[in-house]
Image: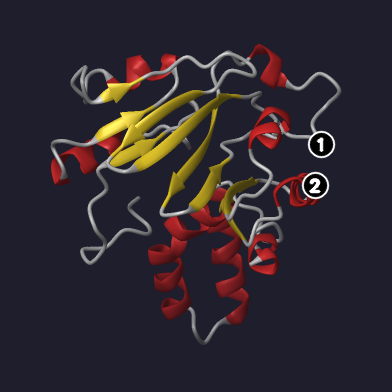
Amino acid sequence: FQAFRNGNHPVPDLVVITHQHNDHCSGPAIQQLVRLNPKLRVIAPLDTHDTLDPILSPDQLLTPVPKPGQPVKISHAGVTIHVYRTLHGWLTDDLTPYGYTFPFHHTYVIETKGRRLLISGDSYDYREIAKDFQKIDAVLWHIYKPSDLFDLQAMQPLFSPSYFVPYHLNIRYGLMQPEMAKIQKRYANDRQKLGQEQMRLYKEHGVNPLGCAVPTLIQ
């Protein structure tokens, strides 16, 4: 939120949250949005109440509980949101992905103006969604490590999306940009020191500089 929104962007009136991990459900970010739009509504899994109840009124926070194979359908301002219960984890995780012990994870299919957007969260679990939708126009898709490219290959024949919009690594990279610009200016004439400071910044933010290239290649 801090990295990518500026004053020229419209204020959102609806936020969808896939799961409770702090890189997907940020209380401070929701607080900022509520200050901009006191009528903001949020759709989120049941276990986000501890984070969001102090910020949102009961009529602002919707916590549907879809069952496997039984998505919940929500309409909001001409937009239709299909909420699926999905596993948290990746196709390339261990044989027993930790998603089986993670109780609440949503994947969303949003329909508006004849277009469909899939918001995957941190899930590879598209089987039930593929039964309902054979075509998705754009996918907001997690990427955290190079092996996630295999998940991308598995998804393409299911939905034939026109656009992939990767997130996770590029969000962290965006948060680094103000400090990165200062480092580049300060050490413009000292390439060795510049490299050292850049690696320090990557380490502080938990970013693999090789991994950051992957979203660029996909786009």
| Label 2: few (<14), some (14–19) or many (≥20) C-alpha neighbours in 10 Å | few
Q: Position of residue 169 (x, y in %)?
A: 58, 52
Q: Is residue 77 above or below residue 194?
A: above
Give the side of residue 9 with respect to residue 66, left or right: left
- Residue annotated with mark 1: 92
Query: Is residue 167 in sight in this rendering?
Result: yes
Q: In the rendered structure, which amino acid carries the disc numbered 2? A: Ser
Q: Of helix, strand and loop, which one carries label 2?
A: loop
Q: Position of residue 28 (x, y in %)?
A: 28, 36
Q: Are marks 2 and 1 in contact (CB under 8 Å)?
A: yes
- Residue annotated with mark 2: 147
Give the side of residue 76 with respect to residue 87, left or right: left
Give the side of residue 184 with respect to residue 51, left or right: right
Q: Is residue 50 above or below residue 216?
A: above
Q: How many marks?
A: 2
Q: Residue at x 28, y 23 (%)?
A: 61
Give the side of residue 147 with respect to residue 98, left or right: right
Q: Quadrant of residue 62?
A: top left
Q: Of helix, strand and loop, which one carries label 1?
A: loop
Q: Residue at x 71, y 20 (%)?
A: 98
